[in-house]
Amino acid sequence: MALKRSRRIYWLPPVLFVLSFILLSSAKIIGITGRAAEYLGLIELPKHPVIPGSKFTDAVFPVLAGNLLPPYISMFLVIIVLAAVMSTTDRLLLTFGVNVSYDILHNVLHVSSERVINIISKISIVSVGLVTAYLAMYPPQLMAWLIWLALGIMFSTWFPALTASLYWSKVSEKAVLSSMLCGFSSTLILGYICGKPPLGLGVTLTLLNAPIYFPVIGFLASTLCLIIVSLFERKGGHEVLV
């Protein structure tokens, strides 16, 4: 929305991909470094508060910061991490409330009362907060499964559709909708198949004896569906989903 020229939006996906790759790679390198330092006895990770006999590996970043940096810098970094977590939680709760109250009530059900929309938005935010707190009481395995499933569904549902809408002139509206439905359903089914019992069947997907992250299959299915439907319809125009 802050772009002065609409054509510059074509540069957003590759720029965001490069930035995300740098940030995620850096986070993984920090994590690997911390695990190696813990293995060599250079740092000591705290015990896990839930799983007996295991270390709290999520504390690698603050432990490394406390051991390698001066106290005033390490405390500053810890505050940054906590602020990032809180801001992300805030944003997700508000986004959920807006999606339910405005996108569904206003755009789909055509509810025009601002008072009703605000009330539903507040109820939605409180409800999802309570549900999230309840789910957090389950073993971490459940939370990890939900997080990976949510990220996989977002990736396989939206990425092929948005990318093709920006860069491929032959993609059609029906192809985009079919692709999103295919990516969502296939990733959801594979998430159940690959999830560990009692959440799923516990099947491990492999290729050349190497494990495969199950949303990759959903992404491929979504992309193939988009290409096949677009080529089948042979339409030149499309609606850009931005």
Image (cartoon, grey):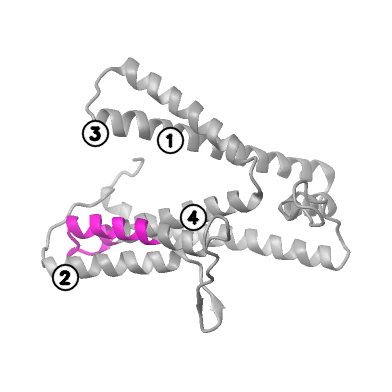
User: Looking at numbered disc 4 in the image, what kind of residue is underneath it?
Assistant: Leu
User: Looking at numbered disc 2 in the image, what kind of residue is underneath it?
Assistant: Leu
What residue would you read off at disc 3? 108
Span highlighted in magenta in the image: 164-186
**Which residue corresponds to the image point at 18% horizontal and 57% vertical from the top-left?**
174
Q: Is residue 50 left or right of residue 234?
A: right
| Residue 86, x across and y down, in percent | 60, 36
Tell me which numbered mark, 2 or 3, is placed earlier along the sequence: 3
Q: Which of 48/94 is in front?
A: 48
Q: Which of 13/6 is in front?
A: 13
- Mark 4–mark 2 distance (CA, rounded to whole Å): 30 Å
| Label at residue 231 | 2
- Looking at the rendered structure, the secondary structure element under dot 1 is helix
Q: Quadrant of the N terminus?
A: top left
Examine the rendered structure and indicate whether residue 239 appears above or below residue 218: above
**Which residue corresponds to the image point at 53% horizontal and 35% vertical from the top-left?**
131
**Which residue corresponds to the image point at 67% horizontal and 39% vertical from the top-left?**
82
| Residue 191, x across and y down, in percent | 47, 60
Mark 3: few, some, or many residues within 10 Å (few <14, many ≥20)? few
Mark 4 near mark 3, Cβ–Cβ under 8 Å? no
